[in-house]
């Protein structure tokens, strides 16, 4: 996405300049829409869940609550699969070449995210009402579990 900022990609020395406490952390900054779009795309690819463009647009629009998302262009493609436009298809690269994950790996990943989310929930509780924090926490959990 053009709405990400990864200065190390374009620096002459091609070194990361995202150093925190003397350690390069290998990150980029991204706006909320771009990050939501990439996370949604990754989630559906990793768990092999088909998704139409219109579904992705609705989910990402709902998740992007701090800016106004608009659709433009030829909307007749709305019922086509996201994979028709992103990534690879079976005809180009066999699915067998994708990184294979087991159910156990997926559970570990979700549990790792839950740990992170519980820390976020604690932060929510410190800055907002209990009802808002619970709503936000539920919203995050719905995104994590397919």
Image (cartoon, rainbow, N blue to C red):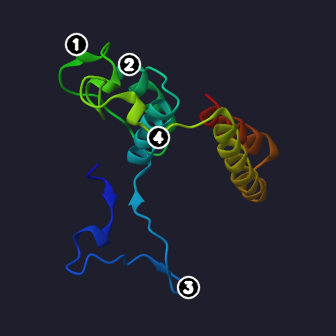
What's the distance in space between the residues labelled 4 and 2, CA to CA? 23 Å
Q: Which mark is residue 76?
A: 1
Residue located at (25% from left, 28% from top): 85
The earlier-in-sequence mark between 4 and 2 is 2
In this view, the residue farthest toward the right is 130
Q: Earlier in the sequence, mark 2 or mark 1?
A: 2
User: How many other residues sit within 10 Å of disc 3, few (<14), some (14-19) or many (≥20)?
Assistant: few
In the picture, measured across the screen, residue 124 lies left or right of residue 146, that is: right
Q: Of residues 94 and 40, which is closer to you in this image?
A: 94
Eye-nearest disc, 4 or 2: 4
Q: Which mark is residue 16?
A: none
Q: Which image quadrant is residue 57 in? A: top left
- The disc, 1 or 3, on the residue closer to the chain's N-terminal end is 3
> Residue 68's spot in the image, x, y percent?
38, 38
- Name the residue beneath numbered marker 4: 99
Disc 3 is placed on an element classified as loop
Determine contact: label 1, label 4, CB under 8 Å. Answer: no
Q: CA distance from mark 3 to mark 4?
A: 32 Å
Where is residue 108 shown, x and y percent of the image? 70, 44
Of tags 1 and 4, the one toward the viewer is 4
User: Where residue 60 sits: x, y (%)?
Assistant: 44, 33
Residue 22 is left or right of residue 106, and the answer is: left
Residue wearing tag 2? 52
Q: Which quadrant would the C terminus be assigned to in this image?
A: top right
Q: CA distance from mark 3 to mark 2?
A: 42 Å
Q: Residue at label 3?
A: 21
Q: Earlier in the sequence, mark 1 or mark 4?
A: 1
**Foreground label between 1 and 3:** 3
10 Å crowding of disc 2: few (<14), some (14-19), many (20+): some
Taking the spot 49% from the left edge, 23% from the top edge, the residue there is 49
Q: Secondary structure at mark 2?
A: loop
């Amino acid at each position: 996405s053009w709405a990400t900022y990864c200065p190390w990609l374009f620096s002459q020395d091609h070194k990361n300049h995202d150093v925190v406490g003397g350690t390069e952390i290998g990150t980029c900054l991204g706006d909320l829409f771009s990050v939501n779009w990439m996370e949604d795309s990754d989630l559906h690819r990793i768990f092999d869940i088909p998704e139409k463009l219109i579904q992705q647009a609705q989910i990402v629009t709902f998740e992007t609550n701090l800016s106004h998302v608009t659709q433009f262009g030829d909307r007749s493609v709305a019922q086509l699969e996201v994979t028709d436009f992103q990534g690879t298809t079976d005809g180009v690269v066999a699915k067998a070449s994708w990184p294979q994950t087991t159910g156990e790996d997926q559970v570990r990943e979700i549990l790792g995210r839950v740990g992170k989310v519980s820390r976020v929930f604690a932060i929510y509780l410190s800055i907002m009402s209990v009802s808002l924090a619970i709503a936000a926490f539920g919203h995050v959990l719905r995104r994590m579990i397919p």
